[in-house]
Image (cartoon, helix red, strand yellow):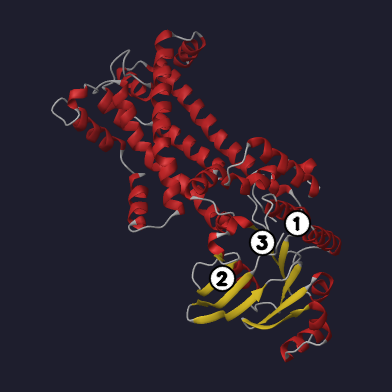
Amino acid sequence: METLHQAWLLMAEFDAALVQIVGLSLYVSLTATFLAALIGIPLGAVLAIWSFPFRGVLVVLSTSLMALPPVVVGLSVYLLLSRAGPLGALGLLFTPSAMIIAQTILIAPIILALTREAVLPLCREYDKLLLSVDAGPGLKLSTLIWDARFGVMTALLAGFGRALAEVGAVLIVGGNINGLTRVMTTTIALETSKGNLELAMALGSILLLIAISVNAAIHALARFGRRYEVTR
Amino acid sequence: MTTPVLIFSKVEVHARGHRLLGPISARVDTPGITVVMGPNGAGKSLFLSAAHGLLAGHSGKVTWDGVAASASRTDRGFVFQTTPILRRSVSGNIVFPLKARNLPAAEKAERVARALSEARLTDFARKPAAALSGGERKRLDLARAMVTSPDVLLLDEPAANLDPASTSELEKSLRRISDRGVKILISTHDVAQARRLAGDILFIADGALVEQASAAQFFQSPASSAAVKYLKGDL
């Protein structure tokens, strides 16, 4: 009970360390979501709209990547960015940038697959109309992405949620350095093992709150999106 | 405005080894409203799709004024049997065909406003199009097809799901559009509707063009036994 009270105080006082950690978490995960969106949304839509050789292989590959274990992604990025690695010269290891890279790799497949699923049913529905008005590839792509916007936003939220809640990859490539690469999840893991439960619980509550908000947003989007669907 | 000339030469549509349409060779050069008539499953939709260049695999050639139908879609408007509704507002749906063209924004806005008011949809402009009733959706489809000011309007069984009042309103709109000099091809299985609208008739049965005649001639003395039967309601 005492711990809970302390945790509440930390949050209520906007404890400097707490704010810094939450801020970095949001910065890393939002940036990763943005970058993953730049990759995942167009690729997901292209995979839904056009058929070409090896499309099936690409679809299977991208869906399998959704199940990538975060520690494996962390390890790969670590090897890539470590001093002896191919990108070692950039000096990115143990920086927020490395964490952003790892999370981007982790969630781009999720955004891609969910975008593809959102666009797919629209393709068949819109096919004749798009052909009838002679829409070019650019208009086709932008139309289908825009009209699948509620599904695409859900994909973004799902990706963001996954990035924010993930520990393994950011721990390996970020190093959990105090004041530099310490985010909510890695701090919880560390502080809990140290027995410093106040900070861990405060962060846990915030993480939970964000997760609930993200899910609430997904549900609200789906509800709102249904207004645009023909049901009769 | 001269009427665009539609020519089908030896058009055949196959699917999985079955012949669904043709071979059809025909020339349609009459102004006004041409009704593509025939029983369900005769191939009217395929005929209209081919006329708009929407079919990927068919043999033979379809041309409008000598240009392949598939290369001149922007000259025409097409109204579908089941209205495709974009997940957008009513005006977002109507402006859509204009997105494929280079028009100044002001001109686009003006055309959409005019199309909305002609379709009596101005009050719904910002509502999701999916919220419209069946009759309103058909008006939206017609407005969307006409927003590009096409020379030709093709309609695939537009009245199939409409009540009598909406049907009569649609027919009024079609006559008005036709009076402006737009060539109209409309398919229907409804003999009464064909009588009300047609300047001339293309009668299709079993995938073949059985008869082509002026409406007066077709309804007075149909030349084929299939048409005689159909008009009597036997087919």
Q: Name the residue carrying label 2.
A: B62
Question: Could you tell me the amino acid type at mark 2?
Answer: Val
Q: Is residue B127 visible?
A: no
Q: Give SS at disc 2.
A: strand
Q: Is residue B21 left or right of residue B217?
A: left
Proximity of marks 3 and 1: CB atoms separated by less than 8 Å: no
Instruction: State the SS at label 1.
Output: helix
Horizontally, is B207 left or right of A66 in the view?
Answer: right
Q: Nearer the viewer, residue A43 or B231?
A: B231
In the rendered structure, the answer to whether residue B140 lies left or right of residue B27 reads: right
Task: Tell me which amino acid carries mark 1.
Answer: Gly
- The chain letter under disc 1 is B
- Of the two numbered discs 1 and 2 on the same chain, state the one appearing first in sequence: 2
The CA span between labels 2 and 3 is 19 Å
Q: Secondary structure at mark 3?
A: loop
The residue where tag 3 is placed is B80
Q: Give me the disc on residue B2.
A: none
Q: Which residue was labeled with disc 1?
A: B134
